Image (cartoon, rainbow, N blue to C red):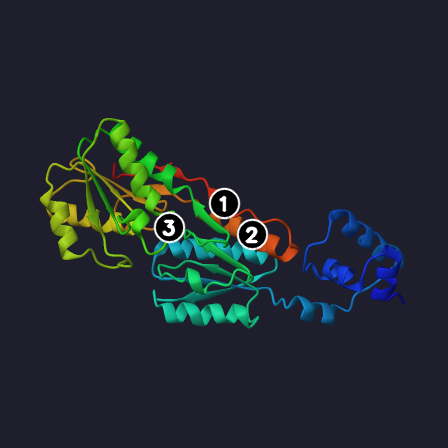
Amino acid sequence: MSSIKDVAFKAGVGIATVSRVINQSGYVKQETKERIEKVIKELGFKPNEIARSMTQQKNHIVAFILPNTKHLFFGELLYEVESALYEKNYKLMVCNSSERIEKELSYIEMLKTNRVDSMILLTNNDIAHLLDKKYRIISFDRIFEGIPYVASDNYEGGRLAALHLIERGAKKFMFIGDDQQGSDNIVNTEVSKRRLAFIETLKQKGFHHVIEIEYPLGNYIDIPDEVQQQVLLHKDVDGIFCISDAVAARVIKTLELAGKHVPKDVKVMGYDGGRSFLNLGKTITSIDQQPHLTAKAIVDIIEHYYKNTRIEPFQITPVKLVIGETT
């Protein structure tokens, strides 16, 4: 029976190079890789699968750290990611951090101790200096130097929202979101581009005044009193773009409880696809992040990690406008 030494000798390379090809654990020139694979086939070499597994330190478990599993879009994204991973023979572990940095760090420790192979990270905490780039980490919607990330086209989403509200006849505009500090955020996030594109597009169309209301980060349950007051204070606003469907649903309820009709008096848009709030009695016009495309992009990066092939530093997935009954 042939050994790894036989393969190395016939291929004219070192044992370590053969090991890297077998275990997909490091860079090998394509020409050399093909020569080794040809020799392996010729000799009928069968690597020890147990030893190979230990060398690769793979268990095919991927952890997904989320700030809050109550957010309905996160639920959709989890479903799509789990489905896409399962098709590739991976299992998904859900980690709810509750926005607490100590929980995130404890979950990241699982990656360092090989209890999970890869990690998808969505955080609102500044942990860039705590992320070791040698591990298989994929960021969603957050940008960390040296870490590949996936995000929907937030800028295009904001642009589509502005154009749609103009098309529907809105004249006075409002943006409600939790990231108005934009580039001053403690975390560099693609989400800020929703607001930036919305305002820039309106200005390009001649609408230079947009009211901006800060919605507390991480509040997915109740619309705060101060936000309700500001929404109702600006009685001339007839076009509102909300940073998420969850916020849009609560704004619609606030307006209707105050006697406003949506969309006759005020047109309201959300962001996430509008699928999760049918209990409003009307569907929300929304920007669909198409989570199945996000999931595919994330799993593609995980596959590249395993194969030691080139990984794109970021992937931006397309969005689309879904017209509901609120505009």
Q: CA distance from mark 2 to mark 1?
A: 9 Å
Locate residue 294, reporting x and y percent. 48, 48
Instruction: Answer left or right for 30 relative to 170.
Output: right
Q: CA distance from mark 1 to mark 3?
A: 14 Å
Image disc number at residue 301: 2
Residue type beneath disc 2: Ile
Neighbourhood count class around disc 1 (C-alpha, 10 Å): few under 14, some 14–19, many 20 upward: some
User: Which of the 4 image quadrants contains residue 121?
Assistant: bottom left
**Mark 1 or 3 closer to N-term?**
3
User: Mark 3 — residue?
Assistant: 189
Q: Nearer the viewer, residue 310 or 266?
A: 310
Neighbourhood count class around disc 3 (C-alpha, 10 Å): few under 14, some 14–19, many 20 upward: many
Instruction: Answer left or right for 22 relative to 218.
Output: right
The correct choice, above or below, for 88 with respect to 263 in the image is: below
Answer whether residue 285 is visible to the viewer in this image.
no
Answer whether residue 123 is visible to the viewer in this image.
yes
Residue type beneath disc 1: Gln
User: Callout 2: helix, strand or loop?
Assistant: helix
**Mark 3 or 2 closer to N-term?**
3
